[in-house]
Image (spheres, grey):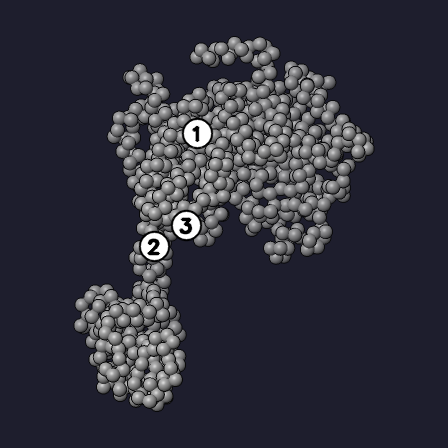
């Protein structure tokens, strides 16, 4: 079978996908079929929370594809995520129709508030679901393509690239904060009512979104694994390890880079589009450079260049974030900061690498070797 | 420009100081008695005559009376008819206030102005000459000409000739008007501009045309000074950018270390200023002189600590360094939030930083911006000196160019690394002191500058201090030039986009490093 061939040598991926499949079956059952009040019943907010983690995991997979395998540390992937989110948010805004505060069937509330007369051209078409979904893919993809085409062609690499990706998301954040941009300014897009006619408050919709997020994660994972296993994937890894040599061997390095970067951005866009209906808001804060760097740390903690490590890292870090911001909000930032430092210093392979080392019983040897050095 | 009431108050003050002897009704001179009779008529025309009479007299204290009349403090004894300047609450039944109306007050103001034009103190003359511009009439032209001939002080002379030209604008003779207009061309006094604007609708076509031409010259000159002001704003913003980026130019440019905690080192410098000011609340004016070295030490020590504990282990792995130092920046921010306060803290400006240097009526340079530019240049020069002329600088450059060879020559590279990082961090702290004078000091201060700083360094070319200076200043100017028509946020976005595109074109910045050291 196709999937088994993709996952042939990917033990971690097999386990991860198996667990994911189990969760995708169990959660809807526990939420919808187990009656409320039973201790096995899963409250809807928890389903949504898990769904949010799954979209983050997909985002982390997208980052791992470019960072782990292509060697591009993108500090701007949050921008692609947010753009996908905004595309979905615009569709959801149009679905509100005349149920907004001002009751204008054509214009979203914030436009009425800014006393705009008609829908700007870039909002046209977003009342159609298929169009919005197309934009979820196209907008981040196009931005990544143009940006990558410019950057990779002129051989901007390493730290320079990281910094200009950061500048990219920073510039977008500043732009989206402006009211004149027509994306709701500071408040962003919110107050969504329903999607494709299903109320966003309903348990069924929430569970469906959760399942879709899980399926998107599985699909994204398989796609990335497929790319990496393909001949193209071999070249990609070669570029990461010895870019000049790959170029001299005769590969058009920039084509490979642009291609993978664009795919990764589209995956991030999908993650954003699934994230927005679940959390119910998208605002320019999603573009903040801090968010993008946080994504990188999920991947670093889980383990670079493993894909399943990215999933693990995203879910673990966000679970920790949920727990600790609830228990002791002050300490979370300290912990996050310490995680950045400790993981880069002591766990360069992340948790996945740790597991691998432990299994192969090399960890202690490595440790003593480092102590001697 | 001085508003008229400011002027009259100043005038009153100076006149009162000048006329120390107390005024008593009994000592009133002949002129005053004569005026008093006219006042008694309680007729505005008569009052005007009385003012003329007073203005024409050579008595020294008439100004006081006129001023009192203007302020509504001049009273007259109902029985004896003597004039009394009332202090507050000193009015009994026997005193009658001398009534005035708007046109009369204007008239009195003019009279006072003319009187003080011949005041012995040049400063008073200058003030009244400036004040004249609003009220000048053609009849005063002759008098002004006379005064101008006698005047010796150049500033007063200038103000008087301006007043004269303004007076001539109303002259009946067309030729005089035209000459006056010509002489006013390029003058930036706001009064002149208003006056000329009204003259563009003059009934005489030639005069109107001349006025229009003169107005255009004035507007061009004003626009020119506007550009100079924009340039100055740009340079001061650029200096802030250079200050913030120059420490990074050392740690990133010379050592190749991506220090995302650089912004937080700036923030620590700003907080050091706050703490220094808390420790010496009575000497705010001197606090900055203490804060600069203190901030250098605090941030520098923190930098060395970071280098020794974290960055040392990550040399040659720039992306990991980026992540680890980002973690440090989070910790430092949260530390400040927990230990000091999550809110912004107040940092006061020393008195010598406030105020502005007035070049002319449209261009004035605020001192704090001026000092920032100077401070930036000083820091730059000092840093340049350290890197070029000292032993440490030599070692830093040696290690950054070829670590192995430098070590072989006996340079203790680990020590040099720590010191270089400390130097860059210390400069960041000094930048924090400067920033504390310009923006709010809060835990997020550093974050606002980190991306800008990287942009400046990358734009200027890594490893090149001059590049950083040129890049910072030019980005500042470009930003301020774009601001008027694009708005502050859009200008910033445009600059960011410009840099992103620029890096595509020249990946190694404005001034790329040449030779072997440039290899990656």
* Residue at x-position 34% and y-position 66%: B2
Which of the image's four quarters has the N terminus of chain A?
top right
Badges 1 and 2, same chain: yes
- For marks 2 and 3, the one nearer the N-term is 2
Where in the figure is residue A154, as x and y percent of width and height?
Answer: 46, 31
The residue indicated by pointer 1 is B258
Q: Badges 2 and 3: C-beta atoms under 8 Å apart?
A: no
Side of A249 relative to A138 (left or right): left
Q: Is residue B29 above or below residue B268?
A: below
Q: CA distance from mark 1 to mark 3?
A: 30 Å
Which numbered marker is on residue B481? 3
Side of B506 relative to B378 (left or right): right
Determine whether the residue tagged by mark 1 lies in a helix, strand or loop.
loop
* Residue at x-position 46% and y-position 42%: B442
- For marks 1 and 3, the one nearer the N-term is 1
Q: CA distance from mark 1 to mark 2?
A: 39 Å
Badges 1 and 3, same chain: yes
The residue indicated by pointer 2 is B355
């Amino acid at each position: 079978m196709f999937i088994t061939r993709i996952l042939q040598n990917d033990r971690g991926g097999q386990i991860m996908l198996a667990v994911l499949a189990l969760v995708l079956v169990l959660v809807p059952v526990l939420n919808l079929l187990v009656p409320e009040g039973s201790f096995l019943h899963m409250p809807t907010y928890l389903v949504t929370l898990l769904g949010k983690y799954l979209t983050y995991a997909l985002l982390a997979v997208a980052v791992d594809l470019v960072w782990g395998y292509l060697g591009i540390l993108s500090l701007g992937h949050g921008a692609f995520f947010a753009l996908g989110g905004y595309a979905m948010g615009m569709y959801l805004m149009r679905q509100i129709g005349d149920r907004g505060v001002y009751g204008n069937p054509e214009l979203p509330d914030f436009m009425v508030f800014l006393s705009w007369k008609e829908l700007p051209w870039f909002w046209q078409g977003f009342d159609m679901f298929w169009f919005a979904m197309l934009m979820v893919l196209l907008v981040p993809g196009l931005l990544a393509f143009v940006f990558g085409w410019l950057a990779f062609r002129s051989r901007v690499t390493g730290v320079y690239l990281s910094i200009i990706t950061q500048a990219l998301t920073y510039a977008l954040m500043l732009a989206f904060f402006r009211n004149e941009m027509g994306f709701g300014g500071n408040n962003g897009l919110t107050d969504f009512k329903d999607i494709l006619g299903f109320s966003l408050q309903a348990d069924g919709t929430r569970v469906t979104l959760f399942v879709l997020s899980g399926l998107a994660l599985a699909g994204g994972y398989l796609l990335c694994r497929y790319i990496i296993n393909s001949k193209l994937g071999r070249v990609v890894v070669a570029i990461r390890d010895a870019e000049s040599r790959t170029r001299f061997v005769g590969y058009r390095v920039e084509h490979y880079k642009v291609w993978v970067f664009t795919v990764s951005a589209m995956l991030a866009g999908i993650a954003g589009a699934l994230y927005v209906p679940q959390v119910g808001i998208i605002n320019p804060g999603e573009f903040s450079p801090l968010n993008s760097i946080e994504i990188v740390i999920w991947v670093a903690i889980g383990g670079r260049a493993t894909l399943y490590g990215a999933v693990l890292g995203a879910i673990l870090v966000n679970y920790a974030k949920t727990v600790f911001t609830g228990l002791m909000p002050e300490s979370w930032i300290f912990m996050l900061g310490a995680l950045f430092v400790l993981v880069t210093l002591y766990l360069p392979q992340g948790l996945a690498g740790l597991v691998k080392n432990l299994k192969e019983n090399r960890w202690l040897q490595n440790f003593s070797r480092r102590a001697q050095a | 420009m001085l508003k008229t009431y400011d002027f009259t108050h100043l005038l009153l003050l100076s006149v009162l100081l000048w006329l120390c002897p107390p005024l008593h009704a009994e000592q009133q001179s002949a002129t005053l008695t004569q005026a008093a009779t006219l006042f008694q008529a309680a007729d505005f025309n008569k009052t005007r005559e009385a003012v003329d009479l007073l203005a024409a007299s050579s008595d020294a204290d008439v100004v006081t009376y006129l001023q009192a009349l203007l302020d509504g403090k001049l009273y007259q004894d109902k029985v004896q008819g003597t004039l009394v300047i009332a202090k507050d609450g000193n009015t009994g039944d026997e005193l009658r206030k001398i009534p005035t109306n708007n046109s009369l007050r204007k008239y009195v103001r003019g009279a006072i102005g003319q009187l003080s034009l011949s005041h012995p103190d040049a400063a008073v003359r200058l003030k009244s000459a400036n004040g004249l511009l609003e009220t000048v009439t053609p009849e005063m032209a002759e008098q002004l000409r006379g005064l101008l001939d006698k005047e010796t002080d150049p500033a007063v002379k200038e103000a008087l000739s301006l007043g004269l030209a303004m007076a001539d604008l109303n002259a009946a003779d067309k030729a005089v008007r035209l000459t006056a207009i010509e002489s006013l061309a390029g003058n930036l006094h706001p009064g002149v501009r208003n006056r000329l604007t009204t003259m563009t609708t003059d009934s005489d076509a030639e005069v109107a045309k001349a006025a229009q031409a003169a107005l255009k010259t004035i507007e061009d000159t004003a626009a020119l000074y506007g550009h100079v002001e924009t340039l100055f704003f740009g340079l001061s913003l650029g200096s802030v950018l250079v200050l913030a980026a120059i420490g990074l130019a050392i740690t990133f440019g010379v050592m190749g270390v991506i220090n995302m905690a650089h912004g937080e080192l700036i923030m620590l410098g700003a907080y050091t200023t706050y703490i220094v000011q808390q420790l010496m609340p009575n000497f705010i004016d001197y606090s900055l002189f203490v804060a600069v070295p203190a901030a250098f030490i605090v941030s520098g020590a923190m930098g060395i600590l970071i280098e020794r504990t974290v960055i040392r282990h990550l040399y040659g792995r720039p992306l990991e360094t980026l992540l680890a130092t980002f973690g440090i920046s989070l910790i430092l921010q949260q530390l400040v939030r927990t230990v000091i306060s999550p809110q912004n803290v107040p940092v006061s400006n020393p008195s010598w930083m406030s105020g502005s240097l007035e070049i002319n009526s449209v261009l004035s340079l605020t001192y704090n911006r001026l000092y920032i530019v100077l401070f930036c240049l000083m820091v730059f020069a000092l840093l340049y000196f350290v890197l070029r002329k000292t032993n440490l600088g030599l070692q830093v450059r040696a290690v950054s160019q070829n670590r192995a060879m430098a070590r072989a020559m006996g340079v203790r590279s680990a020590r040099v690394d720590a010191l270089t990082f400390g130097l860059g961090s210390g400069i960041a702290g000094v930048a924090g002191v400067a920033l504390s004078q310009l923006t709010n000091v809060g835990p997020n201060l550093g974050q606002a500058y980190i991306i800008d700083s990287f942009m400046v360094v990358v734009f200027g070319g890594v490893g090149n201090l001059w590049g950083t200076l040129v890049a910072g200043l030019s980005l500042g100017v470009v930003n301020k030039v774009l601001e008027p028509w694009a708005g502050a946020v859009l200008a910033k976005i445009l600059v960011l986009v410009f840099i992103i595109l620029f890096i595509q074109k020249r990946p190694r910045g404005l001034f790329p490093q040449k030779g072997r050291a440039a290899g990656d």
